[in-house]
Image (spheres, coloured by chain):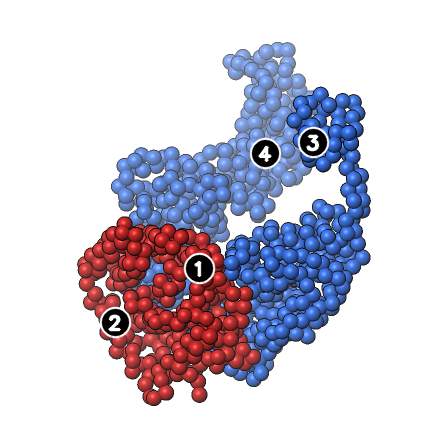
Amino acid sequence: MSLSFQDLILTLHRYWGAQGCAILQPYDMEMGAGTFHPATVLRSLGPEPWRAAYVQPCRRPTDGRYGENPNRLGHYYQYQVVLKPSPDDLQDLYLGSLVEIGIDPLKHDIRFVEDDWESPTLGAWGLGWEVWCDGMEVTQFTYFQQVGGFECRPVTGELTYGLERLAMYTQGVDNVFDLRFNDAGVTYGDVFLENEREMSAYNFEVADTDALFDLFRKAAAECERCLEAKLPIPAYEQAIKASHVFNMLQARGVISVAERQAYIGRVRDLAKAACGAWLERTA
Amino acid sequence: MADFLLELLSEEIPARMQANARNELGRLFAECTQEAGLATGPIDVHSTPRRLVLIARDVAEATEAKREEVKGPRSSAPTQALDGFLRKTGLTREQLEEREGVYFAIVERRGRNASEILGETVKRIVADFPWPKSMRWGDGSLRWVRPLHGIVAMLGEDIVAVEIDGICSDATTVGHRFHHPGAITVGGASDYAEKLRACHVIVDQEERERIIREGAEAATAKSGLALLRDEGLVVENAGLTEWPVPLLGEFDAEFLDVPREVIVLTMRTNQKYFACTNDEGLLAPAFVCVANVAATDGGAAIVEGNRRVLAARLADARFFWEQDLKVPLEEQAKKLDGIVFHEKLGTVADKVERVAKLARWLVETGVVKADAKQVERAARLAKADLVTGMVAEFPELQGVIGGYLAQAQGEPKAVAEAVRDHYGASLQPVSAAVALADKLDSVAAFFSIGQKPTGSKDPFALRRAAIASIEIIVANGLRLRLTEALRGALANCAGQVRDAEAAHRLDRTADELIDFFADRLKVQQREAGVRHDLIDAVFSLGGEDDLVRLLARVKALQSFVETGEGADLLTAYKRAANILKKEKWDPAEVKAGDAPSEEALLNNALISAENSADEAIIKENFADAMAALASLRAPIDAFFDKVTVNADDRGVRARRLDLLMRFRDAVNRVADFSKIEG
């Protein structure tokens, strides 16, 4: 039988743990992607070697569909692996992890399809691929070139697995809520369906936009205070917070196209400043 | 002589970069070897997702030794010049030859063996390779499109030694990522392709393309379907596979409710699948994907996986489609005031307002024969699909989606077609009116805020819009006073922004616009084989901005000047014009009197030619106007033959110059012949 959702995670933990990765727990803040975790953003800067793997819950308020779409979620999990410097056999290591979770590369079609990654809010970019398994994107594979506007030397290799998609694939399930969460009868829907319904309603209809605008300003101001106090980690946390609040405002449809760029620019400036402070402190 | 093999093994090279990479590889290799004077036979280049390969046949064993004389500074030059020359040549003063006050260095270039030159060549190729985007990896500083892992460089059976950032050349490479993951050793250019083929790698992209093309056709034919051919997709899939295996899959026929373009585009851009049609040419619920593996189960799991991915995508598309169907386009159009068209030109709703007004004017003034209500309706709905979920997902389907929605929502056929086709050029009157109004508005609007294309910069694609306008006007034979239409479009913009200054500038902007369209017309007509000087000859008559009439005139003129008669008349015209330019006379001195018969004949011919040319032009019968000119050819030739213009008698001279002037003016009524080349 294929792996349950939780066993998929445990298998990846064991596999990457054996590769010398520190197995971290999710960061306790709302964020749009596993990349935002300081274990990726801050640790990809500077010369020190670093290997880590963790699950990160991701909140994408605009992707919520009230639990009615079989493929789209406003909250889902990414499995994130970072290796610095990126080893020469990173592709083979990655493919090894697929075999470990039950994907036979002689039975399935695994492909590396060009996909350059860029995060305008983090001032980061890299080159790599989306990895396809039988036409489905299961992982984003990136060699970081810049983070926070700074060159990455050495280069960090980043793997981001879409856990739900991967599990849907290995379990042969067409609706995410039908995933076996464990082997004791709990489904993904049991755990998250109500969450999707309520959070979609909250994100699209209820969230107090005035309070959100206020939160954005306060997070930005707090970030700057932390920067003045030469505390890059709390400063970076406030940048993450501002980024999430911005995502909420977008879901509420209160940010115009013209304003959008300005908000992204503001978050990027905060993130860059925090990255700069981090580099200075560790230099 | 031996063959040289170079393989640069890397992680997956983006498919879209491979064709160019092959060209650059060949170019750089040829450049380096030529520069070093190393002779080679034909060069072949290949690519797979993981490798760039070059094979050069018949490489010379070594370059020939050469003796070269290099000219240096004059012996009287300052010592710095001499020192510099000595440094450059690596010689001493004593080794130079001095001849006639100038130093010469004799430089001996030893013959170098091929493998030394090839090693340097490989280094330069890797260092100078112009990837559109390159990257670093690990803790190295080398840049390549993706991490570079291996270099096979062999001359005959010998390894050409190269070391680049820790990567040393050797004779080993790898086969297919999954079929043959281990190292394989090649013997050289002679067995490279066959060794790799045995390890499930087809090195030649053209062969992979052929396998995909033929395999996809065969797979569809087997199911009684036809492949929707797509060469771009063939090439892309060949760039994504080392061992391509086309596989046919099916999807649920209920998705066929979704517009065909959406399904084909989803399959093509998101999944890189080929679409199929049935024997009636309708889209079939099937796809062809190209796997990169000869799967152990014959591809069953791969097809099933791809089917599920496609089903999820099509379910998404159908969701948007069904949502969009529920909202009348008219309602969607109201949301266009939330989309900025350009910060100085208002929202898309503002643009729609202008386009509707201009389109209606085109009908009301009789330029386009169509139902004014339908035209206005189509113009008001044309941009509404920009706010649909479908166009948000697939921006390239703007227009197409609107057309489907208009049709499904019961709009008249002509309106739905106009919504669909207004981004292009159409022969259907309603579509033509909306399309033309849309484009004229864009060009006029951007000109009105000073955003004119300059040099290579044309961010709003105004040149294309102007050419498309011209095509619509010409193809539909629209009798439009372009100046009037453009002034109307400018006035619409000025009225909307209530910009007094823009209104003030209107005249000047209108002139700029006409010049801009005239230039575009020349560009567009040049491709149709119409001479630009003839367009100038008609344009410079002034007041002609009816492009249909103008082009009819230009075409008649072109047929005329390309006949012997036309060429002779042009010669006579130029001769007359030259004389008139040089001579001065007083018309008051003109003296009547007995003229030689040639003079009288020309006078008579002019009277009749002037009349018939005028008449023909009014009737827009330009061939007759040209015939009227042609009737002048014999009389003017005879006149020049027999009559002396510069007669001694001032009165006679003035009379003859007057006659020549009438001849020139008569010709100029049809076209300004002074602009015609030749």
Residue furthest top in the image: B649
Q: Label 4: which residue?
A: B676
Q: Nearer the viewer, mark 4 or mark 2?
A: 2
Q: Label 1: which residue?
A: A48
Q: Label 2: which residue?
A: A199
Distance of label 1 from label 2 (alpha carbons): 39 Å
Q: Is residue B318 visible?
A: no
Specify whether A158 is left or right of B98: left
Q: Nearer the viewer, mark 4 or mark 3?
A: 3
The chain displayed red equals A
Query: Which of the pair B454/B225 is nearer the observer?
Result: B454
Distance of label 3 from label 1 (alpha carbons): 49 Å
Give the residue displayed 63% in from the left and 36% down from the top. Answer: B566
Asked if disc 1 and disc 2 are in contact, CB closer than 8 Å, the reply is: no
Q: Which label's residue is closer to the chain start, 1 or 2?
A: 1
Give the residue displayed 41% in from the left and 36% down from the top. Answer: B511
Circle 4: element type: loop
- The type of residue carrying mark 4 is Ile
Q: Position of residue B96 (x, y in %)?
A: 77, 30
Mark 1 belongs to chain: A
Q: Which label's residue is closer to the chain start, 4 or 3?
A: 3
Mark 3 belongs to chain: B
The chain displayed blue equals B
Q: Label 3: which residue?
A: B85
Mark 4, other Cα within 10 Å: few <14 / some 14–19 / many ≥20: some
Circle 2: element type: helix
Mark 1, other Cα within 10 Å: few <14 / some 14–19 / many ≥20: few
Asked if disc 4 and disc 3 are in contact, CB closer than 8 Å, the reply is: no
- The type of residue carrying mark 1 is Glu
Q: Position of residue B660 (x, y in %)?
A: 58, 23
